[in-house]
């Protein structure tokens, strides 16, 4: 797997190609994933950190919707990083349903079919679930309560029919890691309350 330094370099280069708040969001996801993984037996916090940094690496290709997960998958596969490529595909899908993506469906039918087969053919492991969780609690300035992050996404993308089902699935990821950590994961992350009290608009 990529070293932490190489992952940081990849993210920095990608942000030069397509500047935006997604870079700081990725760093936030990585920091939160590392802190949580440190509390879970048999999880590698360095691996979790790299996966967090790279989960949105497909945004290097430009401003896109669902296409960023395929761009990330293809790029990570091209440099021999299948574990990270997997995270690029799974991080947005706590529900294994390709229709439950918040944002533009700017991909081909063939890509959707590949994604459907991939999600249905693979069981999520704790790294998949951890990055899904951290994606749902990480603003560019750090961790926040999940409800704030979900509302932030809803304000940008609206409320599709699957919204409540997907919110419940994200909340289930937190319950999973609360159990694995033996505590409320928010207790492990700095400035959650401060970040959660800041206005979204």
Image (cartoon, rainbow, N blue to C red):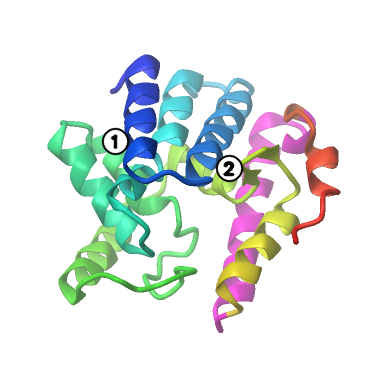
Q: Secondary structure at mark 1?
A: helix
Residue 66: horizontal and vertical position, in percent?
Answer: 36, 64
> Of tags 2 and 1, which is closer to the observer?
2
What span is in magenta? 160-187
The residue located at (59%, 68%) in the rendering is 156
Q: Is residue 30 above or below residue 137?
A: above
Residue 90: horizontal and vertical position, in percent?
Answer: 38, 52
Quadrant position of the C terminus in the picture: bottom right
Q: Secondary structure at mark 2?
A: helix
Residue nearest the observer in this picture, 8 or 167: 8
The Cα atoms of the two marked residues, 2 and 1, are separated by: 17 Å
The residue located at (84%, 39%) in the rendering is 194
Q: Which mark is residue 83?
A: 1
Q: Which mark is residue 134?
A: 2
Q: Residue 169 lies in what quarter of the image?
A: bottom right
Residue 97: horizontal and vertical position, in percent?
Answer: 40, 70
């Amino acid at each position: 797997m990529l070293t932490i330094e190489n992952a940081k370099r990849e993210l920095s280069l990608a942000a030069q190609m397509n500047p935006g708040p997604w870079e700081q969001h990725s760093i936030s996801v990585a920091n939160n994933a590392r802190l949580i993984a440190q509390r879970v037996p048999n999880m590698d916090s360095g691996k979790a950190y790299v996966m967090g940094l790279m989960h949105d690496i497909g945004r290097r290709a430009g401003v896109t919707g669902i296409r960023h997960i395929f761009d990330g998958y293809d790029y990570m596969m091209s440099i021999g990083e299948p574990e990270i490529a997997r995270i690029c595909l799974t991080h947005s899908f706590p529900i294994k349903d390709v229709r439950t993506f918040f944002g533009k469906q700017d991909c081909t039918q063939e890509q959707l079919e590949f994604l459907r087969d991939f999600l249905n053919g693979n069981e999520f492991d704790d790294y998949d679930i951890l990055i899904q969780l951290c994606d749902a609690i990480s603003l560019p300035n750090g961790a926040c309560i999940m409800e704030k992050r979900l509302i932030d996404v809803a304000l940008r993308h609206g409320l599709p029919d699957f919204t409540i089902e997907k919110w419940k699935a994200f909340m289930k990821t937190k319950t999973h890691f609360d159990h694995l950590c033996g505590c409320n994961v928010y207790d492990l992350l700095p400035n959650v309350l401060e970040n959660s009290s800041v206005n979204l608009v």
